Image: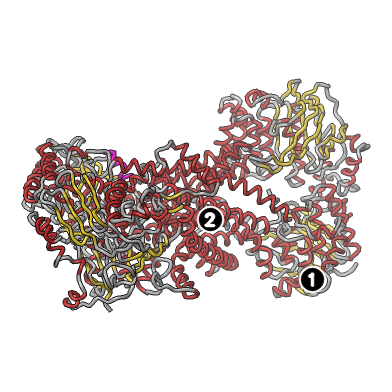
Amino acid sequence: MSFWRRFARNLGAMVGLAILALVALMAVLAPVLFPFSPWEMRGIPFMPPGEAGFLLGSDSLGRDVAAGIAHGALVSFLVGGVSTVAALLLGVTLGALAGYAGGWVDDAIMRFTEFFQTIPSFVLAVVLVAIFTPSIASIVVSIAIVSWPPVTRVVRAEFLSLRSREFVQAAEVLGRGRIAIMVTEILPNALSPIIVLASLMVATAILLESSLSFLGLGDPNLMSWGFMIGSGRSVIRIAWWMSVFPGIAIFLTVLALNLVGEGLNDALNPRLARRRGIVVT
Amino acid sequence: MMTEARKAATSALGRRTLLAASAAAPALMTLGEARAQGVAPRRGGVLNTIITPEPPVLILGVNNQGPTLIVASKIYQGLLTVTPSLDPAPDLAKSWTRSDDGLTYTFALQEGVKWHDGRDFTSEDVIFSIMKFHMEVNPRARAILQRIDKAEAPDAHTVRFTLKAPFEPFLLIFDVTACAMVPKHIYDGTDFRNNPANATPIGTGPFKFAEWQRGNFIRMVRNEQYWKPNQPYLDGITWRIVPDSQSRALALQTGQVQMTTSNDIEPFDVPRFQQQPNLTVALNGWEYFSPLSWIEINNRLDNLKDPRFRRAMAHAVDRNFIAQRLWFGVGKPATGPIASTTRFHDPSVQMPAFNPREANAILDGMGLRPNAQGVRASIKLMQIPYGEVWNRLSEYLRQAMRQVGIEVTLESTDVAGWVRRLAAWEFETTINFVYQWGDPTLGVERTYVTSNIQKVAFTNTAGYSNPEVDRLFEAARNAAQAEERRRLFSEAQKKIVEDMPLVWLMELAFPTIHDKRLNNVIRTGTGVHASFDDVFLSA
Amino acid sequence: MGAAKLLRFLAARSVKAVIVVLAIVVFQFVLIRLAPGDPASVIAGQSGAADPLFMQQLREQFGLDRPMHEQLLIYLRDMATLDLGFSHRQQQPVARLILERLPATLLLTGTAFLLAITGGVALGVMAARRVGRPADSAITVLALTFYATPIFWVGLILVLIFSVWLEWLPSFGMFTVGAELSGWAHALDVGKHLILPSLTLGLFFLAIYARLARASMLEVADQDFVRTARAKGVPEGRIVRAHVLRNALLPVITFAGIQAGQLVGGSILVETVFAWPGIGRLAFDALLARDYATLLGVFFCTAVMVVVFNLITDLLYAVVDPRVEVA
Amino acid sequence: MTSPILSIENLTIGLPAGGDRANAVEDVSLAVRPGEILCVVGESGSGKSMTASAVMGLLPKGLPVRSGRIMFEGNDLLTLPAETFRALRGARLGMVFQEPMTALNPLMRVGDQIGEAFRVHGEKGDIRSKVLALLEDVRLPDPPSIIGAYPFRLSGGQRQRVMIAMALALGPSVLIADEPTTALDVTTQMQILRLIRGLQERRGTGVLFITHDFGVVAEIADQVAVMQHGRVVEHGEAAQVLNAPQHPYTRALTAAVPHGRARPAETHAPEPVLALSGVEKSFRRGGGLFRRGSPVQAVADASFTLVKGETLGLVGESGSGKSTLARCVVRLAQPEKGEILFHGTDLLPLGRAAMQPYRARIQMVFQDPYASLNPRRRVGDIIAEGPVTHGVPRDKALARALELLALVQLDAGAMERFPHEFSGGQRQRIGIARAIALEPELLIADEPVSALDVSVQAQILDLLDGIRKRLGLTMLFITHDLRVAAQVCDRIAVMQRGRIVEIGPTAKVFGAPEHPYTRELLDAIPGKAWTPPLEAA
């Protein structure tokens, strides 16, 4: 059965994909739907949803919450995507090295990884962002720095098991180079768990970004969902919509990413279909 | 004593002193007066209130942060305090005189005052506190105390200071928030900052330190040996540490606390509490501090060093919007470099009004033409890390500047990073606010004079320099007579507004919100920094 | 496992743990000193006044005028005697500051952890036993929901519902100050304050445990030895209890060991929302105030907590799983 | 003839829609009589295990029983209430599974697991002594210490004995054994077979024995049923089915069983291709950055010479070091000591680059056809990979790959397909094509047929032999199956615990073994008394 058919059979995954598609559409259409800066103060502050032309209400400066959510989608995806890619680059490289080389290289890399896992990741992210001062770059880098250890562990485990697989040994016996073996023989076969992990990492990164923003460690120039909750939380009693709607946006996106991740997991590893991917972040 | 006081009455300040010492002293309301007003002070009850952020230590002088001042001012006392109109009023000194040449000040101390550990409070303590303790640990006080030539204690209850030169605002430095009296027998000869006794403050005030659970609460109890008979009225005060502003608002709303001060309540919550019938919202009590906020502009940089550009920035900002929309009417728009509640404010001096068209015209005149995106110039604004409202302010400024074609990029920092960059002049623009300490010489001069361009925060970090302004502040500092000073300061205000080294935004006010049953909360120019010995909870 | 073996295991792991903790301390020490600004500038900033002499005095007092490697050596030397240093900012020994706030964090994280692991495993087992049925779907959806919701947002919503609208529970603090309760009344008071924060922190982890337990149960249920038990005629209930559950708990234990640190991280957020006087909040404030000694102390303390927790889970694992050759 | 104690009547078990056939098991009728062993034999996918599961009521969910009955002690098992059926399981019906390593709960002591069988069926009294007696019965050494041991302490054979003890604990009238010896070494297999036979004879138990191995059938069966594609194609007395098979499928199967007769020795020029002397290799188990693990000697002092055109068989049980030794030759493992001379050049000290020219000359065929091909690459690329690595232009290499496909009897369409589209035997052909694409002189075949069904085995062995002759290959052939070794090799080296204990011409090793271990191995060949009939065709 093809990958797509297996994936499409999973109701949750399809729902997740639909939500993601909607959010992506919203991100793309934001400049059309709300052809103005989300920072623009367009009306009376603290308007409840539906009043004064504000679909989801207005915030403490009279900015449009709906516009913020639409424009923030891109930022959330950007933060999630870029930090995940960065974490993957680091994690896959280290994991591949550790798993393929084995021996002291493996030991050293794994100790290093364990070390990073012993430091509470959120605490480390907070410290890093505070040190580099909050900006989109420092947030992305910090999220990447705290997100790579699980990747390394997963990739290492895959490489370790694949390394002793006979097709890899066959490549060794054929005289192929080490890097060629790692990149063309092992890596393509280790992709499924990496893809699954990546989809969940994007979700985790979006959550992390919102948590950082909540503590006041967001990028002040970007309208992100986390920022919106962070700025709305202090007025939650007067204007619940300011934090509730961005919260729902985060929830839906993270949920969708998780559903898609599970769907991918089931479709890519049919034998382990029932083993739900839990990412240890 | 009174005769000497009368001699001093020729000076404006001295005349008011006399009044203060007799009838107008708000801190000295007697039982009879209170009954006359229809509220009988009731003894008993604990005041539950909030303090944010948690003070690191409660020793005044060693630490002078806002929360420390509010809490520790119940434990410690100064020689004087100030009235809402910024005249001195008695505290540990029951009266004082100034010599005609303006050089010698003599204080008569209250008698029967005891430290919380039972030792007597004497003139020795005063000399030690002023000349040793604050001289070493307290940078703000030091700048003024260095003008003292000689400090003597003729007897146990008299202290005399002789200045090197006349200094008209001298008495403003004796408030508890500036120069608290500390016990000599504990601190003399020790390392003040690391004295183990810093964990258990000993003062003369109406409340004694009882317990401090870090991150949780500070509890103080009535000082039974307090030198004012039958006072304080309250059994104690408990300061809860509540880092989350909404939790604070809830606590106030539900009556878990009876008072909030300073930044406890965010401005947007204030209108709500003004509606609540059991609460009083007071916006006064900050006259002594008169915090003034502004856009700090690095006058050394391109564009920003051009007064026209700065004027354009000023024209772009709607200060009424800021006052109404961001601060919800708490505080008022600034008019110039000296806050209206500070002495020598000149109401005739007005900074450029909100007028984007004018701003555009100025920028056009400078040759800064908008590009395709409508951007004439780009600047960075370093956010001040003091909470939500300040972030909203920088977001507003970004939008406002964009309206006249100035693109603003925000930079985010925390307190340490902000102070470091401010001190190192590593910023283009930022927002700043400072206390004015009642007198331009004490709290305004430092921001504008060339001699104070230093790599230290809260100096003239903008790098503004105008020899004429320097001269005017210098003259005002040394002038012995208030009228002369008023003239000089008016002149200085005009010059500064012409140059617009900064764009002043708001004369800040901090709401003190309290239960209506809580009486006498704000009686002085320092508001909640008073000793609270006369505060009581009516039944 | 014999007592001697156990001791050897503990000794070996303790050596490793000490090395890890030491490495973390050095790493963090270097890291936080990379931050712009120092405690002196914070104090200057918050006092609203400073002069060069004052700054110099402060830096000397804090020992910041020495070269960094010297500061590090001094710090490590002090730590060898379990002296975590002195917070000049708070005028308290760091150890005391931390000990004052540690119980609150332990209470919060402990309660959340117990809630998460018992609730999570129970839900996971329930779901696995009814796999594919409505109860399973309900539990799965619930777990996904909590897993996908920002932790602080859950806190806000809980406050909104239970404190603001329903007024059932207090929204912040650890106990009612001024009430001066003692004994059971005090415990009850703390308990009431504990409900929302521990729920907030616990629900996220409960979701994880539920998902993990469910997956693990299903996986174990497929294994040969379960079929063996069935072929022996062991009743279903006993199969679940004696065979499946015990084996399914192994990954849960492993995960519990790994995520101990995340619990501490989450407590920063929860302590912020609920004004809970714990070390998470202490660390965040210390970070903003550049209170190096306190911050490092908290890091040290959490590292020790995490390492000790790992050790406990390893031990537990070794006890549950005879295959672990104390290695 | 006694009446059957268990009879399966017209059993049909469906498969979920979309499978390769409608029913897993179709119209199967079998009968087990007391004191008799019924062997159900068939290749993988024949439905034999499914039938056994149906009897135990352990069919996976989603596989419906479409028709038929399973009569046991007067009841139709298929209609029994769940609880009644459960009470029968373990008490009246015992079952032993294929994989002893995973069939025991790793977290429960052996004694408790056996005791559980008593407890859940309400047995009271001194369960411990009953367990001890059982352990004694299945001839486990030192029962008192085994009773308190966890399964991981036991070897595969010991665990299988525990399983048997457990299955027989309550004296069931029928024992179902699903490939109980497949995962075991040949000597252990023989012990277990004898144990089952002995216990069954003593207790009069009826046994339903599932296996794919005709040797095993010959060893223990009273009755034989042959299954193909879910149907019983032949059913009868063991001797009858084994020696005079009627159904073509049975005939094909028996014919494909390696006959175990030494092949006529070929003579080869004494030109040594490969000479090993004193090769040693040990592994470390456990350990980490700060601690070294305990060493395990995998190969000790191995020496042999391989001359041009010769096939040397390396035989031994699992863990004997035969595969490790082969891996040492292709440098997948790095020996600590010794010499590996290839045409006189010692390969051992060569680095990765220096080894490169020799890579083309020494190639390897792997055991597991499912694991030895990269699932993400097309077959053409897999075969061309070696030549491309060694500098042959890609299009040339691909053209060559096409020829090789023909040589291994696959059609050209295979080039563009992925490995998962092929059966095990076809994949092994691809693996052979890959190995010979580099035109090696020395081919190392590591258990090339042990993962294949018996009929496929024979084809692959033929193919290998043909290619060897055609290309004049020298071959090192590793196998655990002595019958296969006899058929393929000129000379045999027997390995035990890392050492070569005996080496000599095949006929001599089989006919007059010198080392006791060799004799033990030969004795353990199941059904060695039986000679498969040659296909009558």
Mark whose residue sits in front, 2 or 1: 2
* Residue A190 x/y as whole percent: 56, 43
Residue A9 is one of the magenta-drawn residues? no
Tell me whether marks 2 and 1 sit on the same chain: no
Please tell me the numbered disc located at residue B83: none
- The answer to which image quadrant residue D59 occupies is bottom right
Report the front residue among B497 and D477.
B497
Q: Is residue D257 left or right of residue A174?
A: right
Out of D438 and D46, give the one closest to the viewer.
D438
- Give, as a three-letter code, the residue at label 1: Phe
For disc 1, the marked residue is D72
Residue at left 79%, top 48%?
D253
- Residue tagged by mark 2? C260
> Could you say whether the residue bearing mark 1 is in a helix, strand or loop?
strand
Label 2 vs label 1: CA separation?
54 Å
Q: Which chain letter matches label 1?
A: D
Closer to the camera in the image, B395 or B343? B343
Residue at (53, 55) in percent of width and height: C260
The residue positioned farthest toward the front in the image shown: B155
- For the rendered model, the colour scheme is secondary structure
Secondary structure under badge 2?
helix
- Relative to B500, is B196 above or below? below
Relative horizontal placement of residue A100, taking residue A70 as reference (left or right):
right
Give the residues drawn in magenta, as a range.
B417-426
Residue type for callout 2: Ala
- Label 2 is found on which chain of the structure? C
Residue D285: x %, y % from top left: 71, 42
